[in-house]
Image (tube, coloured by chain):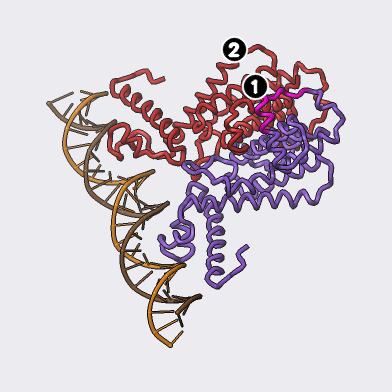
Chain colours: A red, B purple, C orange, D brown
Amino acid sequence: MSASSTPRALARERTMTRIVELGNAQLRTVGAAGLSVREIARGLGMVSSAIYRYVGSRDELLTLLIVDAYEDLAAAVEERLADVGEEPRSRFLALGGAMADWALAAPERWTLLYGTPVPGYAAPSEATNAPGTRVTREVLVIAADAAGSADGRRQESGSPTLAPEVVALLDRHLAEFDIAADAVTAARAVTAWSGLVGVISAHLFGQLGPDAVALGEDILRPQIEALADLIAPR
Amino acid sequence: MSASSTPRALARERTMTRIVELGNAQLRTVGAAGLSVREIARGLGMVSSAIYRYVGSRDELLTLLIVDAYEDLAAAVEERLADVGEEPRSRFLALGGAMADWALAAPERWTLLYGTPVPGYAAPSEATNAPGTRVTREVLVIAADAAGSADGRRQESGSPTLAPEVVALLDRHLAEFDIAADAVTAARAVTAWSGLVGVISAHLFGQLGPDAVALGEDILRPQIEALADLIAPR
DNA sequence: CGGCAGTCAAGAGCACTGCTCTCGGAATGT
DNA sequence: ACATTCCGAGAGCAGTGCTCTTGACTGCCG
């Protein structure tokens, strides 16, 4: 990528990763809205204005951390998926489990990705789209596999009627991801993915009550299994 | 509630509701993290310090707005449910539709409830629990109804095994809500509810891509139907 | 009716934020 | 060796949440 690597560029690279580290640490302690570029400058031992040589703005720092988190999450999921067989259902369970584990280990980073978008800030899609869709793509692949290997029983069981624009949108994304599947399958995959995010977020944000949080993933696993029924019934 | 209603208390009440109005307006324009008590003071035509006679702190303002939003949402859902019959599936669809409509109409308020918890702030559960669980309760009731009226086909189809502590927790909540249902049904209800929140949030936060947002509720409806399959298959 | 307590708004001020501008010194490429 | 580019420091602006003090106004009780 950056091949030149003059000492200056190297030093820059180092402080950039240092900034991401400090940012993640800050995320852990004060959360996204509490992010302070001044505080990061202090952590680097420089004065507040100097940090702007590196990040430019608070939003830019946010983007940095978001991309970093997306990539970390996607890597965790893909690593887990590499260790599991081809059976669609178990792949979905593995994916869901990996997401849940990652989220529980780094709640604030999860929050950064799937929580409230920081107000007044829109992640530049050109930077975040690619890493952000890696997991979604996996879900679509799994759903397509499951639909392909299934006898027709699910199709009959009740496909909701999709509006034509929705079909068009889903088909467009399928083509973009280079996945062969019908729109109904894709729609269920999207639901399974959104549901996964919802279930994990609800747990993480404590919306199921404080005692549910204590149970940890015991309460998450059966929910992930239920969502798996949407695309890959046992 | 407040029966005395001396002119002084009345004036106070009025400015309190005025504060909530201004807060919601501010939510609409700048979002939760952009909430400024000074700005509200300006809206009231008073100086920044005077507002603290009424709200005490930024967190207190937040709590005020959260409770207000919870109650508004629950009212909207219950109103919609009053117009629909007893059939569980259609009740779930109505509930989901009402939530989606409410969320689309007031995205920032939805965000306040189901988005990232504002960092450094934990909603005092004694104030938010009651209004916050009204919708959840409805979902549990619907699921219990559906399970009661179903022939056993769903039970066989695949109940995930629940950890004993999870069963205990669910039973406790069922008792608290005064609902007769088994833990497996309750678990599916929780999944349906979390999934609902996830699907709506994903759409609202634009995590399905910008073009999906444009489609509005056309893309939400089939997903809500898919989630309905979890507790009340057609 | 008079005075006293409670209530409220105002003003000044503290510590913090993001961000900009300018200025010197140091490393870099020619 | 020179010019350019880069980087850190410092000062400063406008905004934030929040506190403390001061002065005015209200309602109640003797």
Does A120 appear above or below A28? below
Q: Amino acid at mark 2?
A: Asp
Measured as percent of width and height from the top left, residue B126 is found at 58, 47
Classify the position of the C terminus of chain A by image quarter: top right
Q: Name the N-terminal-most of marks 1 and 2.
A: 2
Q: Amino acid at mark 1?
A: Asp
Q: Would residue D17 appear left or right of B99 to someone viewing this image?
A: left
Q: Secondary structure at mark 1?
A: loop
Q: Residue at x 50, y 41 (%)?
A: A118
Does A188 appear above or below B94? above
Say whether residue B168 is magenta: yes
User: In this rendering, does residue B98 appear at all?
Assistant: yes
Q: Using a 10 Å C-alpha cutoff, classify the residue at mark 2 as few (fewer than 14 neighbours), some (14 to 19) or many (20 or more).
A: few
Counting every numbered tag in the picture gives: 2
Q: Which residue is mark 1?
A: A178
Q: Which residue is mark 2?
A: A83
Q: Residue at x 74, y 36 (%)?
A: B222
Q: Nearer the viewer, residue C6 or A37?
A: C6
Q: Chain of mark 1?
A: A
Q: Using a 10 Å C-alpha cutoff, classify the residue at mark 1 as few (fewer than 14 neighbours), some (14 to 19) or many (20 or more).
A: few
Measured as percent of width and height from the top left, residue A166 is found at 71, 35
Q: Nearer the viewer, residue D19 or B100?
A: D19
Q: Nearer the viewer, residue A90 or B169?
A: B169
Say whether residue A200 is magenta: no
* Residue range corresponding to the magenta coloring: B158-169
Measured as percent of width and height from the top left, residue B32 is found at 52, 48
